[in-house]
Image (cartoon, rainbow, N blue to C red):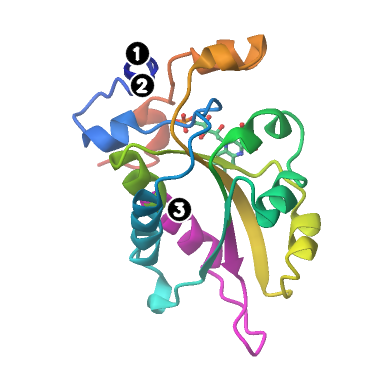
Amino acid sequence: MTLINDLKTAQTDAPILEVLAGRWSPRSFTNDPIDEGKLAAALEAARWSPSAGNSQPWRFIVARRGSEAFEKIAATLMGFNKAWAPKASVLLVAVAQVADGEGKPLPTALYDLGQSMAHLSVQAHHDGLHVHQMTGFERDRLAAAFDLPENLMPFSVSAIGTVGTPDDLDEVLAERERQPRTRKPLPELLLVNE
Ligand SMILES: Cc1cc2nc3c(=O)[nH]c(=O)nc-3n(C[C@H](O)[C@H](O)[C@H](O)COP(=O)(O)O)c2cc1C
C-alpha cells in the first residue's frame, strides 16, 4: 500500500515528523486480524497522554472483528460509515468520563479524550496501523448497548487496522480515497502571530 500512503502524505510548509505527515484516515482496510502487540502499544500511548490534573478521563471499548462487542458497535454506525468501517480489524469507542463519581463535571474531559486519541493514532501509524475516527454513529444507542452510566459519554468510534486498496471500495468512496489530503493555510489559523 506504499502508493496510496505516498499519495496521502501531507505536503507540509515546514518539516514535521514523518509519522505526523504520513498519518491519514483510510476507509479501505485489509481483513487481517489485528496485530495485538501494535494494538497494545496504541492503547498504551493513549494511557500516557497528558490530561488536566492527571484526571485521565478517557475510557475505551475495544472490539475485535467477529466479537459480539464489534457487532454492537457496527450496528450504531450511521450513513456511509456502515458500508466501510465494519471491514476494519477493530472498532474502538473513545469514551469521555464527563463527571466524577459524585457527579461533579470534568470540564476538560473531551479535550483530554481527544488528545489521548491523537496519541493513539500517531503511535498506531508509527507501527503500521491506520486509524479512522468517526462521530457518525448513534451515541445514545451505543451507550445503551454497553450499559454506560450517565457520566460516561461515547464520543467517537475508530476503525483500526491495516490499510487496504481503494479498489475494494465503491466508486464514490474509492475516488475520495485517492484524493490528496488538504488543509487550510497556516495564516488563516493564526489569530495572533506577533
Ligand atoms: C472527531 C472526528 C469525527 C469524524 N467523523 C467521521 C465520520 O463519521 N465518517 C468519516 O468517514 N470520517 C470521519 N472523520 C474523519 C475526517 O473526515 C478526517 O480526519 C479528515 O477529513 C482529515 O483527513 P485525514 O485524517 O486523512 O487527514 C472524523 C474525524 C474526526 C477527528
Q: CA distance from mark 3 to mark 2?
A: 21 Å
Q: CA distance from mark 3 to mark 1?
A: 26 Å
Where are the magenta residues, as a range?
94-119
Q: Earlier in the sequence, mark 3 or mark 1?
A: 1
- Locate residue 107: give its quadrant: bottom right
Q: Classify mark 1: residues with Cα within 10 Å, few (<14), some (14-19) or many (20+).
A: few
Number of the front mark, 3 or 2: 2
Q: Is mark 3 within 8 Å of ligand 1?
A: yes
Residue at 43% x, 33% y is 162
Quadrant assignment for the N terminus:
top left
Residue type at mark 1 is Leu
Q: List the residue tagged with mark 3.
A: 117
Q: List the residue tagged with mark 1.
A: 3
Residue at 64% x, 47% y is 66
Q: How many marks?
A: 3
Residue at 32% x, 29% y is 22
Q: Magenta stretch containing residue 103, yes or no?
A: yes
Q: Are marks 2 and 1 in contact (CB under 8 Å)?
A: yes
Q: Classify mark 3: residues with Cα within 10 Å, few (<14), some (14-19) or many (20+).
A: many
Image-based side of 186 in relation to 177, left or right: left
Residue 5 is labelled as: 2
Q: Nearer the viewer, residue 135 or 173?
A: 173
Residue 138 is labelled as: none
Q: Is residue 12 above or below residue 88?
A: above
